[in-house]
Image (cartoon, helix red, strand yellow):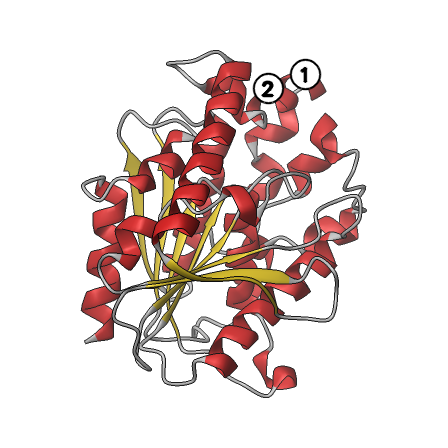
Amino acid sequence: MDVSGGNHRHEAPWKRMSKEELDNQYSPSRWVVRLGAEEAMRTYSQIGDEVTKRARATRRSLLDVPYGAGEGEKLDIYLPEAVSEVMPFLVFFHGGYWQSGSKDTSAFMVNPLTAQGVAVVIVAYDIAPKGTLDQMVDQVTQSIVFVQKQYPGNQGIYLCGHSAGAHLAAMMLLADWTKHGVMPNLKGFFLLSGVYDLEPIMHTSENAPLLPTLEDAQRNSPLWHLETAPTQPSYPACRILVTVGQHDSPEFHRQSREFYQTLCHGGWKASFEELHDMDHFEILWNLTQEDYVLTQIILKTIFQESR
């Protein structure tokens, strides 16, 4: 696959697909294997609700902390029992096609990670139609600046996002931190079943509330920018894990592999993991389990890099 100069965009399989096929490819619930589409969404939402309630009941937390002036600019901080100035932080951005989802149902990984000494931050952002993609990217940037300023001695900030949240996390590879007056101590990215080229989304029914122009889509496509960026990464020590579920759609697989290859071509420390027998939603909700392979990869990465 050519990742050297963007020519793949003219050959991308999605360009030969009908709108119906694109809708199918970019509707993750249609690809689940153990549940029906509606039941999968209901189960995903129910698990998120239950684990968040449990985390709030059993873990030390600071809830609805404002990271900006906007009404939707809030985050939740879940702390390990042994709080210290040098804790590592995992900052999570929820999915939902930039149109749904909430920090209040997204604390999947809180219990396993805080049990091992990692503070977890779950970020809210203004979803469409209230928020635009540009605003969401700016809000995610602000939330990271906030964490760095509140905990300047942190042992590393690790960004994690699922689906649309993986896109927002990936956009932080392009962030200009100088205008924020702080360089966050970014050590790693965990990108779960993400979308990194937004142009195909413009041709699906998912696009309606977002209404990006082609320019909007290109400006907010990390894949496009990393292809043309200098090969010297902004954070040379950063580790980036790109993951996709075995049962994600072919287009989600293509996007993830292409983004991983582009990172490697650009000199980033990237790795790729296809999670066996996982669909788009299970890849995230299994983070409630400490023995889940992805939980273990996240913990191992954090504690290797934090030493």
Residue closer to the observer: 39 or 211: 39
Q: Residue furthest top?
A: 36
Q: Is residue 268 left or right of residue 296?
A: right
Disc 1 residue type (three-letter): Glu
**Quadrant of the drawing holding the C terminus:** bottom left
Q: Report how far apart the C-alphas of labels 2 and 1 lie in the structure.
A: 6 Å
Residue closer to the observer: 236 or 53: 53
Residue at left 22%, top 59%? 116
Numbered circle sitting on residue 283: none
Residues at marks 2 and 1 touching, judged by CB atoms closer than 8 Å: yes
**Quadrant of the drawing holding the N terminus:** top left
Measuring from the top left, give residue 150's x and y in whole percent: 49, 80
Q: Which residue is mark 1?
A: 20
Q: 10 Å neighbourhood of mark 2: few (<14), some, or many (≥20)?
A: some
Q: Which residue is mark 2?
A: 24
Residue at left 55%, top 75%? 146
